[in-house]
Each structure stands twice: as structure tokens, then as C-alpha cells.
Image (cartoon, rainbow, N blue to C red):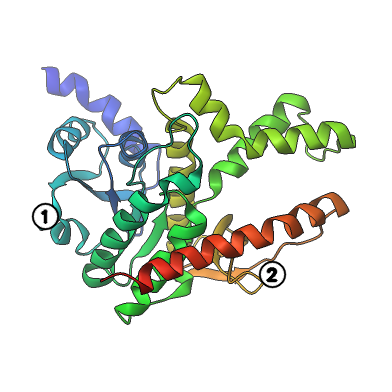
């Protein structure tokens, strides 16, 4: 009797989404037990686009996988624990999302995270290069300005580098900008006086620190980052399924500036980046900010590249 009662709700939920043959993305989350990994895995499990979800971490993944597997959506879930199980987690994956690494604590800069997270990202992406070289790789692990060059250099070392399939997930900045702008003005085309624009820009730039302080040492921006990561993955899978006109910003290999990598709007397609849409029209205020950012960005990129060159 219970199963008969339970069935309509599940059936209705599934009917409300398209479940065409294309909606069969196999997605892996590396770092699935962490502060970003768990809510990100939940959002992915909730999506009709995902048919298989594989979760990897060095602790607690069987429990996270068991918990998520009780949710009535279609994706099958399996947890993998420790380096020896990583290859099986990755085999056959279409998309790999990597939020693994240490979170930021009060007083830490993104650069403070570099030494620990650089090693983690290099290790995980080496496994991706070996076991799912064709997959889309979405890097969340900070500092993204360095971890994307690390990923690219690792894939080059393994002879499977495709710049159209490696993404630094910068979607959280877009999500925050949308949220903060909507708090102030909720109309489609907005303009701000210079003083308000400066304050707003500063808030978007420092929003991560705002959350770290508000959590008082108990964590960083995990929930909003999970949302942003999921949003990017869903856009990517939509594009891989043939949906047209899908645009998201991401930090990728680029010729749009003097930097070898840069974040701009990208038209996504079946094979990853279809077209880099470039920086577009910018105001003098924005132009000045880009110019100021370039030297620091170049240094972060070089740091990532050098890290892989010096790896044993």
C-alpha cells in the first residue's frame, strides 16, 4: 500500500522534467564529502540531466553516497574512497567537477591555499587525464587563477590536452553580482552612480571574505559556491545535449587579453567551448580594473605552470 501511495509523487516529479535519451550525463564530484562537495552533489542528484553520479573523497564518501542514494530522483549514486578507488570513479564520466581542497579561514588569502590545493588538483587532474581524458573538467578549487593552469599543464604532460574542455568555475562572481544588483535595482538594464558602483564592485570582489567573517571561522562560501558550480554544470550539460545559445562565463585558455587565461562569456556547445565571446564593451572604470588585474593574474598563472614543471 505504501509503495502505491508513494509512486504518484515520484512519477509526477519525473514527468515534470524531460528525460530524453540525451539526458544521461555521467558526472563525478571529486571532493564530494566537503563543504562544497556535499551540497553540490545534492543539487546534481536533484537534476533530471544526470543519470549517474560518482562521488570521490579521502573520507566519508560511502556515507554521503548512501544518504543521497535514498533520494527518489533518477541518478544512480556511488561513493569511492581513497586513491585506489579514484580510477573507477572516473571511468566513463562526461563531466568531472573538482571542489576538493582546503577552505579559506579568516585572515587567509586565496594564495595561502595554493600549496595545499595545488598538489590536490594536480593529483586529481592527473587521474582524470588517465581515466576520462575526453571529459569536461570543471575546477572549483581555489585559487582558480592558478589551478586552471595546473590542470592544463597536467593534461599536456599526459598528451590529452584540449583547451575547450577545461573550465575554471567563476560562476559565483556572476551569481553574486546578480544578487547584489537585484538588491539595489531590479530592472533589466541598470546604471549606477560612480560611488555606488565602486562600493558594489568592492562588495562583489570581497564577498567571499564577507561569508568567511560571518561564519566566524566555521567555514567559507560553500552553499553559494555549490549552487554556482551546479548552475555551470547544468549549462554545460545542456550545451552538450545540443541546446543552442548557452552562455556562461568561465576562466579558460584565452587570447582575449595579454594573459594566457582569462574569464569571459563563452558560447558552450557539444564539445565544450564553441566560441569565446570576449570581454565586450567595457566602461573606462572597468577598463582600468582589468588593467590593474592583469599583472597579478599573470603571476598567478605563472605560479601554477611552474608548480607542474617542478613536480617530481
Label placed on residue 257: 2
Q: In this view, does 36 lie above or below 132?
A: above
* Label 2, residues with CA under 10 Å away: few <14, some 14-19, many ≥20: few
Q: What residue is disc 1 on?
A: 85
User: Which quadrant would the N terminus be assigned to in this image?
Assistant: top left
Label placed on residue 266: none
Query: Which residue is pictured at 52% across the width and 23% down the height?
Result: 213
Residue 196: percent from the left, percent from the top?
Answer: 83, 31
User: As drawn, which residue projects farthest toward the bottom?
Assistant: 159
Q: Is residue 181 above or below residue 96?
A: above
Question: Who comes first in sequence, dot 1 or dot 2?
Answer: 1
Q: Let me know if residue 20 appears in the view.
A: no
Q: In this view, does 212 lie to the left or right of 132?
A: right
Residue 261: percent from the left, percent from the top?
Answer: 57, 67
Secondary structure found at label 2: loop
State the residue in front, 39 or 283. 283
Residue 158: percent from the left, percent from the top?
Answer: 29, 78
- Spatial CA distance of label 1 from label 2 is 40 Å
State the residue in front, 69 or 85. 85
Query: Which residue is pictured at 40% across the width and 47% down the height?
Result: 18
Q: Is residue 148 above or below residue 78?
A: below
Secondary structure found at label 1: helix
Query: Which residue is pictured at 9% across the width and 57% down the height?
Result: 84
Amino acid at each position: 500500500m505504501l509503495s502505491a501511495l508513494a509512486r504518484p509523487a515520484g512519477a509526477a516529479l519525473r514527468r515534470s522534467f524531460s528525460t530524453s535519451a540525451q539526458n544521461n550525463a555521467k558526472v563525478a564530484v571529486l571532493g564530494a564529502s566537503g563543504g562544497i562537495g556535499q551540497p553540490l552533489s545534492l543539487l546534481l542528484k536533484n537534476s533530471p540531466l544526470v543519470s549517474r553520479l560518482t562521488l570521490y573523497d579521502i573520507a566519508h564518501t560511502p556515507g554521503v553516497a548512501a544518504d543521497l542514494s535514498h533520494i527518489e530522483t533518477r541518478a544512480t549514486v556511488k561513493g569511492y574512497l581513497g586513491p585506489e578507488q579514484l580510477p573507477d570513479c572516473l571511468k566513463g564520466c562526461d563531466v568531472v567537477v573538482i571542489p576538493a581542497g582546503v577552505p579559506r579561514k579568516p585572515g587567509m588569502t586565496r594564495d595561502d591555499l595554493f600549496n595545499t590545493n595545488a598538489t590536490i588538483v594536480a593529483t586529481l587532474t592527473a587521474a582524470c587525464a588517465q581515466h576520462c581524458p575526453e571529459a569536461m573538467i570543471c575546477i572549483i578549487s581555489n585559487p582558480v587563477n592558478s589551478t586552471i593552469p595546473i590542470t592544463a599543464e597536467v593534461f599536456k604532460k599526459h598528451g590529452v590536452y584540449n583547451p575547450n574542455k577545461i573550465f575554471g568555475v567563476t560562476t559565483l562572481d556572476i551569481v553574486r553580482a546578480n544578487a547584489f544588483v537585484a538588491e539595489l535595482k531590479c530592472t533589466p538594464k541598470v546604471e549606477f552612480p560612480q560611488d555606488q558602483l565602486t562600493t558594489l564592485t568592492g562588495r562583489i570582489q570581497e564577498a567571499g571574505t564577507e561569508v568567511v567573517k560571518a561564519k566566524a571561522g566555521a567555514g567559507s562560501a560553500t552553499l553559494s559556491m555549490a549552487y554556482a558550480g551546479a548552475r555551470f554544470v547544468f549549462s554545460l550539460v545542456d550545451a552538450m545535449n545540443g541546446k543552442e545559445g548557452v552562455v556562461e562565463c568561465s576562466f579558460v585558455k584565452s587570447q582575449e587579453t595579454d594573459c594566457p587565461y582569462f574569464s569571459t562569456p563563452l558560447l558552450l556547445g557539444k564539445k565544450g567551448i564553441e566560441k569565446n565571446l570576449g570581454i565586450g564593451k567595457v566602461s573606462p572604470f572597468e577598463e582600468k580594473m582589468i588593467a590593474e588585474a592583469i599583472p597579478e593574474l599573470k603571476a598567478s598563472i605563472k605560479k601554477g605552470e611552474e608548480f607542474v614543471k617542478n613536480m617530481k
